[in-house]
Image: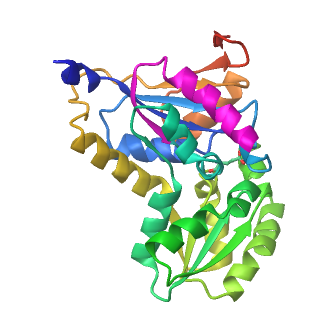
Amino acid sequence: MLRALERYKGVALFDSGVGGLTVAGEIMRQLPFEPLVYFGDTANMPYGPRPAWQVRSFVYRIIDFLLTQQIKMIIVACNAATAAGLEYYRERVKLPLLGVIEPGVRAALAQTRNGRVGVIGTSGTIQSGAYQQVFQRLAPHITLFSQACPLFVLIVENELTRSPEVYGIAEEYLSPLKQAGVDTLILGCTHYPLLVEVIGAVMGPEVKLISSAAETAREARRILTEMDLLHPGGDALLHRFYVSGPAKKFSAAAVKLLEKEVKAFQVILDNEAPLLV
Ligand code: DGL
């Protein structure tokens, strides 16, 4: 009986901003009956340049908030937050909790033919060596080339993806990976699928671009199925969106990305009890 009620709870996702919506969109496609609870920590965005301890301190507050929201699973829809310490978050939470790095690595392994894989991400993710560690564990024969692209998140959050300078910035970041002859490139930041056109144009059509969103959604479906927690459907679907920064700006971006009606609410997490603004 209890298990039956658990199925109706939400799947929670969080990111520093709109990037995690690329994962949310994929969950909506693959798990169309699951109500989502999304948190965008826009007041603290970007996470990428921050030290891991600070990112973890933001994540702890987000998780504490999400746990008040009737949820059955947490997806860390942010590479920088995943790299800062998935194992720490798992210690604090009894629910299934998954990150985006391992699913991205698995998707890349399924694609590469020449064993030369690139990964791009925020400075925090690249410096953490989190991707190297997962490749080392799952496929030590792969040669991994990493590149931080710190401006990409700000380009996406400020809706500058179509500005003329972006191509040159992308070319500067990506040319070492092109020269290295990678045949597969992991978009190791959930914001980067929103720059897929320019990244694809720079890398060329022969390089496969990997977004971890689809693989993460598959993993979420596998876990929910295994735990008998899939939503049975039949209810009117109610997604909830929360942000720590201004809600209007986030809602407008989310409507464009998800092509759905989104009304986000601002929540201040600095207080002991979260304050809904
Ligand atoms: N979207 C986040 C990621 O996947 C990072 C963005 C940020 O730097 O805040 O890494």
Task: Indicate whether residue 142 is drawn in magenta.
Answer: no
Q: Name the residue rendered at 72%, 57% in the picture.
A: 122
> Residue most toward the left?
1
Rendered-image quadrant of the N terminus: top left
Compared across the picture, whether 98 is left or right of 199 comes to: left
Of residues 266 and 252, the one drawn nearer to the viewer in this rendering: 266
The residue at the far front in this view is: 91
How many numbered markers are drawn?
A: 0
Give the quarter of the image for residue 17: top right
Is residue 62 in view from this perspective? yes
Left or right: where does residue 18 sit relative to residue 160?
left
Which part of the image, by quadrant, shows the C terminus?
A: top right
Residue drawn at point x = 51 percent, y = 53 percent = 100
According to the image, what is the colour scheme of the structure?
Answer: rainbow
**Horizontal and vertical percent for residue 98?**
45, 46
Q: Main secondary structure of the magenta part?
A: helix
Place of residue 125 in the rendered image (x, y in percent of width and height, measured from the top left):
68, 57
* Quarter of the view holding residue 11: top left
As displayed, is residue 252 above or below residue 133? Answer: above
Residue for point 39% across, 74% down: 110
Question: Does residue 209 appear anywhere in the picture?
Answer: no
Counting from the top left corner in percent of width and height, residue 23 is at: 49, 46
Q: From what the image shows, is residue 224 above or below residue 3?
A: below
Question: Left or right of 116: which side holds 24?
Answer: left
Highlighted range, magenta? 53-75
Query: Considering depth in this image, is 63 or 189 the residue closer to the camera?
Result: 63
Q: In the rendered view, does 105 fall on the left or right side of 40?
A: left
Vertical side of 117 occupied by 156: above or below: above
Q: In the image, what residue occupies the spot 68% across and 75% down?
A: 202
Q: Position of residue 92 (x, y in %)?
A: 51, 32
Q: Is residue 73 magenta?
A: yes
